[in-house]
Image (cartoon, helix red, strand yellow):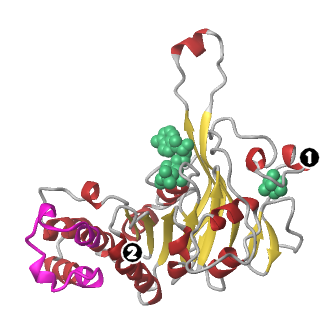
């Protein structure tokens, strides 16, 4: 990325304390335990970029999104927004600007919207907070957001309630609400996984439009690698709280290096033919994020695990231009 990122995280951590059973305390096991949901994540997203964050259920994708937005307080690390630090010495004006300019779209629009609010009330709510005392501007921004979300003609939706809308229309309302305040950074957490397959592309095209035409920086979270090529500029693969491979979307999908990514890519159905290269098969389940495996976190499931993998954790290293991987099998070029 050439320009300054809109959002950047360095060594971001989110550890949830484990509330232990009283019996464990009585037995004298006093050392605190944590679910290391996000455990040293580095990422940067520039204006106009869509970073796809992919990984199995429980790998820490949503926690990364929520922590980047500061909806969950980070345990450690740094977050910068448009070059200004959000954690250490954050000023009130930076905090307020961030609250407006960083928004999220959730997986389930039925839960995200108040069933007693009309579309106009739902979409208008953040505008009423951030543009208080400017009703004409609020109205203009509300209609613009609805148009951008594909709710056309906007006027025909304003007085409808959630129960009067389809799942796809509801997700568009949730999107209109998120973009009404014209954010610079948008997290889309599995925005289409609850929707009918036939309407997913329309919603994903909105994300592409927000990035390319409105220059938003977007974190697109999904289990589904098959949508990533269409949507993302860059992909980051997450495993047990860490990013283990990242690079341009085509590179990661066409030439995955980490055995875990190769397994995920291998599990994607191929239209009309055989694969040209063999892929690793994913076996076993994700270990729990409290007692992480020593060495490489993937070693208990990795068919290529070596002795070193059991003792030494690999770090992200440059394997090719813009393509980084954390695996002892790869990585020799110096990181820029
Ligand atoms: N509030 C919480 N308290 C304790 N543990 C949590 C909390 N939220 C998430 N976790 C744990 O953190 C880990 C990562 O969860 P997260 O929801 O971020 O994963 P995910 O990759 O988004 O999964 P999915 O694909 O199922 O949405 C999991 O082990 C989860 O159980
Ligand atoms: S470091 Fe070792 S165990 Fe981990 S993915 Fe690479 S080869 Fe497999
Ligand atoms: Mg999630």
Sort mark 2 into few (<14), some (14-19) or many (20+) by Cα contacts within 10 Å. many
Residue at horizontal 53%, vertical 72%? 226
Vertical comparison of 34 with 226: above or below: above
Q: Is residue 118 above or below residue 312?
A: below
Residue 225 drawn at (x, y percent): 56, 69
Residue 115 - label: none
Q: Is residue 205 left or right of residue 161?
A: right
Number of numbered discs: 2
> Which stretch appears magenta?
144-172
**330 or 281, which lies in front?**
281
Residue shown at 45% from the left, 83% from the top: 208
Residue 307: mark: 1
Q: Which part of the image, by quadrant, shows the C terminus?
A: bottom right
| Left or right of 136 in this view: 66 | right
Residue, disc 2 = 183
Q: Residue furthest right?
A: 307
Q: Inspect the magenta stretch and tell me whether residue 154 lies in it.
A: yes
Q: Is residue 92 above or below residue 173?
A: above
Query: Comparing marks 2 and 1, which lies closer to the viewer?
Result: 1
Farthest residue in the left direction?
A: 159
The answer to whether residue 69 is left or right of residue 288 is left
On the image, the x and y values in percent for residue 4 come to 61, 80
Which is nearer the N-term, disc 2 or disc 1?
Answer: 2
Q: Quadrant of the N terminus?
A: bottom right
- Residue 319 falls in which quadrant of the image? bottom right
3D distance between C-alphas at marks 2 and 1: 47 Å
């Amino acid at each position: 990325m050439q320009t300054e990122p809109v959002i950047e995280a360095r060594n971001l951590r989110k550890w949830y304390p484990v509330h232990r059973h009283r019996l464990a305390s009585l037995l004298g096991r006093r050392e605190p335990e944590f679910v290391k949901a996000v455990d040293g994540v580095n990422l940067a997203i520039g204006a106009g970029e869509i970073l796809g964050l992919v990984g199995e259920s429980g790998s820490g994708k949503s926690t990364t999104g929520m922590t980047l937005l500061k909806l969950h307080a980070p345990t450690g690390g740094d977050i910068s927004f448009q070059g200004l630090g959000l954690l250490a010495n954050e000023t009130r004006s930076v905090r307020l600007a961030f609250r407006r300019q960083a928004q999220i779209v959730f997986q389930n629009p039925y839960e995200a919207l108040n069933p007693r609010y009309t579309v106009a009330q739902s979409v208008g709510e953040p505008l009423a907070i951030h543009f208080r005392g400017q009703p004409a501007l609020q109205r203009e921004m509300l209609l613009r957001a609805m148009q951008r979300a594909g709710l056309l003609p906007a006027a025909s939706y304003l007085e409808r309630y959630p129960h009067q809308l389809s799942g796809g229309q509801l997700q568009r309302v949730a999107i209109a609400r998120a973009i009404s305040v014209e954010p610079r950074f948008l997290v889309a957490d599995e925005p289409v996984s609850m929707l009918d397959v036939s309407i997913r592309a329309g919603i994903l095209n909105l994300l592409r439009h927000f990035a390319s035409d409105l220059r938003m920086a977007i974190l697109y979270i999904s289990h589904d690698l098959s949508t990533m090529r269409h949507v993302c500029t860059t992909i980051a693969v997450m495993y047990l709280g860490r990013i283990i491979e990242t690079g341009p979307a085509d590179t990661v999908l066409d030439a995955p290096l980490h055995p875990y990514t190769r397994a995920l890519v291998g599990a994607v159905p191929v239209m009309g033919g055989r694969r040209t290269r063999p892929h690793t098969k994913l076996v076993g389940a994700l270990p729990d994020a409290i007692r992480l495996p020593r060495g490489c976190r993937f070693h208990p499931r990795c068919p290529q695990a070596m002795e070193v993998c059991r003792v030494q954790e690999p770090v992200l290293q440059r394997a090719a231009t813009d393509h980084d991987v954390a695996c002892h099998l790869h990585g020799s070029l110096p990181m820029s």
